[in-house]
Image (spheres, helix red, strand yellow):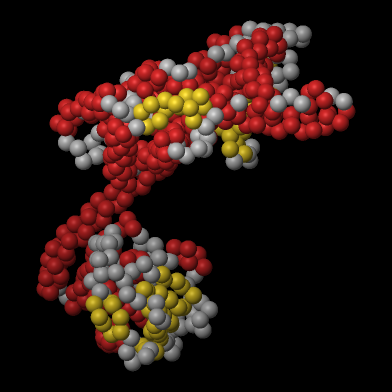
């Protein structure tokens, strides 16, 4: 029995390796290295046939085939050289000497056959088995050395490649270890170890795993075959377990003949039965489909064409039209009159989970008579509930053949909906980004234009100011006030339109605040109370902090000028992460209708103001990645609170007008 299993394992390996070699030869255009891999499979088949020849007593044939052992690692080394070309430390010109590795392998083989390399005699349960002699060990050492060299090159390939090729190399290392553990058991007789070579029974798996580790990520069809093979093996194992349980139960009820069938025979019978069922499944399914759904036969090529057409659409309307076009081409009989005389037509409705309709069929309401005679009942309902799905609605009156075709088409539609939905969302994002880019470019250009105009206005203002010196004092004062107001607006406009680039340095915030307070006191003759620790050190841009404080304090001073007992308070504080600046005044509250637009440009109630003061403050604060808020709940009618990072980045990106 063990000899039978051993022979069966060798024959399965020979047949599978030969078939795989032929398939790899057919696929050689997709990957030239597959030619060498096909040669490796043939070498494995030849080596296994040598063991078969030994079992049959053909000594000379067996010796010649088994001593051709060096061809196995040589073909594998050749495959590695071709497969990893460009990612291993071998010069391109060195590939001209590739035939030399085959010459060495053939020389070692010829030397082994000519010399005393091995003999065949009985061992264990085998009447004939190959034993290695003196020169044969040289043959074996050469074989192992070439195999090690191939795997060293694989290590270089692993280091210099990424993605699927790297995964394939890892798989090949694992398979190589598996193959080594299987093949080494054939030297047991030569080592005088009387143990049956059970590992060699698993030889059929080695060749298949080597090829699968290479082509898994290159040829997708292989994964489908492997999936089917695993399914078949799982069914076989489960059926054997169930049969064993069945035999255990039927033995006590006098069915001893069946219960005494040897397990191996049951396994073979079950395997043959399942194999026949697997081979007959396809034809049986085709026969049943033609019987139940006459005229609805769709081959795989047609399904692939449908899928390609569906995935090429660019809008929901185009998707619906493509579905209808596919249906009209392959199922023209679905347009037929029902018993009421109305014509049934298929339609497509696409909507999301909330009921928003992306597309739905519409009748031409202008043709009332036609609308009455034409009724769209059969619908492909494409619905997005997390993932897309396609349901058939109103197909009760459609013949079974066409219903079956509709089911096949509906199975392809969700994938097309997903791809289209993703592409539409991506197009929207790209369109929005392009609009924002154009708007930002426009704002940058507008800011530059504003700055240029503001600069140009200063020259005529200077001329007007000089001309006013020769006028009446009242007229002169009026002109100079208006010129000063225009100068203020120009200054604020340039400040608002220009870039804000932070230049922080180690500063005492309290000293900066004291300088600004003195300046505001001189201009407005107001009293400003400073509440702060004596020293608040940090990384501050002196000019920008002054600009913030001047704008807020000037604004507060202007509003409390008409307020009896007007007061302004400036509070400064620090935590470990931020600086807080709070400006309070007891002037009039800000009207509610102005609150949403408080920091927008040209919004002001201040007489003579430019309307840009708070907008400029907001831009500077944003450039710091800080925040500014207005409050009426801090014990004052008006309070502005600014939070700034304690240590803003020195290389802060410049802020432009469009960043506001």
- Quadrant location, the C terminus: bottom left
Residue 224 lies, with reference to residue 356, above or below; the image says above
Answer above or below: position of 647 versus 399: below
Q: Is residue 437 above or below residue 290?
A: below
Question: Where in the figure is residue 443, as x and y percent of width and height?
Answer: 30, 52
- Residue 229, image x and y in percent? 56, 27
Left or right: residue 410 versus residue 479 is right
Question: Horizontal placement of 536 versus 232: left or right?
Answer: left
Considering only vertical position in the picture, is 309 above or below 525? above
- Residue 49 percent location from the top left of the image: 43, 20
Which corner quadrant holds the N terminus? Answer: top right
Q: Nearer the viewer, residue 415 or 594?
A: 415
Instruction: Left or right? Give the position of 227 relative to 260.
Output: left
Query: Where in the figure is residue 325, as x and y percent of width and height?
Result: 53, 15
Residue located 52% across and 32% down the image: 124
| Residue 73 in view | no
């Amino acid at each position: 029995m063990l000899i039978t299993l051993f022979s069966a394992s060798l024959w399965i390996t020979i047949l599978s390796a030969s078939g795989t070699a032929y398939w790899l030869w057919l696929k050689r255009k997709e990957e030239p290295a597959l030619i060498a891999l096909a040669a490796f499979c043939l070498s494995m088949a030849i080596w296994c046939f040598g063991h078969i020849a030994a079992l049959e007593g053909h000594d000379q044939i067996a010796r010649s085939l088994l001593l051709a052992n060096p061809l196995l690692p040589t073909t594998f080394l050749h495959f590695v050289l071709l497969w990893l070309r460009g990612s291993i430390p071998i010069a391109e010109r060195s590939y001209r000497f590739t035939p030399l590795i085959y010459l060495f392998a053939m020389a070692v083989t010829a030397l082994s056959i000519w010399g005393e390399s091995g003999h065949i005699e009985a061992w264990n349960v085998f009447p004939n088995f190959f034993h290695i002699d003196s020169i044969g060990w040289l043959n074996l050492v050469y074989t192992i050395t070439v195999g090690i060299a191939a795997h060293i090159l694989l290590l270089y390939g692993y280091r210099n490649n990424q993605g699927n090729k790297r995964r394939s190399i890892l798989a090949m290392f694992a398979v190589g270890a598996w193959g080594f553990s299987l093949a080494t058991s054939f030297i047991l007789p030569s080592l005088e170890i009387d143990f049956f070579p059970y590992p060699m029974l698993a030889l059929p798996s080695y060749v298949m795993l080597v090829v699968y580790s290479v082509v898994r990520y290159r040829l997708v069809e292989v994964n489908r075959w492997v999936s089917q093979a695993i399914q078949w093996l799982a069914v076989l194992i489960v059926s054997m377990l169930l049969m064993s349980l069945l035999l255990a139960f039927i033995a006590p009820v006098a069915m001893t003949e069946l219960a005494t069938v040897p397990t191996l025979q049951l396994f073979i019978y079950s395997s043959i039965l399942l194999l026949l069922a697997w081979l007959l499944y396809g034809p049986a399914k085709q026969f049943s489909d033609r019987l139940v759904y006459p005229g609805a036969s769709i081959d795989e090529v047609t399904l692939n064409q449908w899928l390609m057409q569906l995935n090429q659409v660019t809008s929901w309307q185009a998707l619906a039209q493509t579905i209808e076009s596919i249906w009209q081409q392959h199922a023209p009989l679905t347009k037929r009159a029902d018993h009421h005389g109305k014509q049934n037509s298929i339609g497509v409705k696409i909507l999301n989970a909330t009921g928003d309709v992306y597309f739905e069929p519409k009748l031409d309401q202008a043709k009332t008579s036609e609308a009455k005679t034409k009724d769209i009942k059969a619908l492909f309902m494409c619905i997005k509930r997390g993932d897309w799905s396609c349901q058939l609605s109103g197909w009760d009156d459609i013949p079974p053949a066409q219903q079956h075709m509709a089911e096949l088409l509906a199975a392809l539609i969700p994938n097309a909906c997903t791809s289209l939905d993703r592409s539409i969302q991506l197009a929207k994002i790209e369109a929005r980004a392009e609009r924002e880019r154009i708007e930002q470019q426009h704002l940058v250009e507008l800011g530059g234009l504003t700055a240029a105009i503001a600069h140009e206005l200063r020259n005529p203002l200077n001329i007007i100011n000089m001309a006013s010196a020769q006028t009446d004092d009242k007229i002169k004062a009026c002109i100079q006030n208006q010129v000063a107001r225009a100068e203020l607006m120009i200054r604020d406009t340039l400040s608002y339109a220009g870039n804000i680039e932070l230049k922080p340095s180690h500063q005492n915030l309290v000293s900066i605040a004291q300088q600004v307070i003195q300046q505001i006191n001189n201009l407005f003759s107001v009293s400003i109370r400073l509440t702060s620790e004596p020293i608040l050190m940090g990384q501050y841009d002196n000019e920008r902090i002054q600009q913030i404080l001047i704008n807020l304090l000037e604004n507060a001073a202007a509003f409390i000028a008409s307020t009896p007992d007007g007061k302004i308070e400036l509070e400064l504080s620090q935590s470990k992460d931020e600086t807080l600046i709070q400006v309070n005044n007891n002037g009039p509250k800000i009207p509610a209708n102005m609150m949403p637009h408080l920091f927008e440009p040209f919004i002001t109630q201040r007489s003579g103001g430019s309307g840009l003061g708070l907008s400029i403050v907001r831009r500077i604060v944003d450039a710091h990645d800080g925040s500014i808020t207005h409050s009426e709940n801090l014990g004052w009618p008006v309070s502005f609170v600014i939070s700034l990072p304690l240590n803003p980045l020195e290389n802060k990106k410049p802020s432009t007008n469009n960043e506001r």
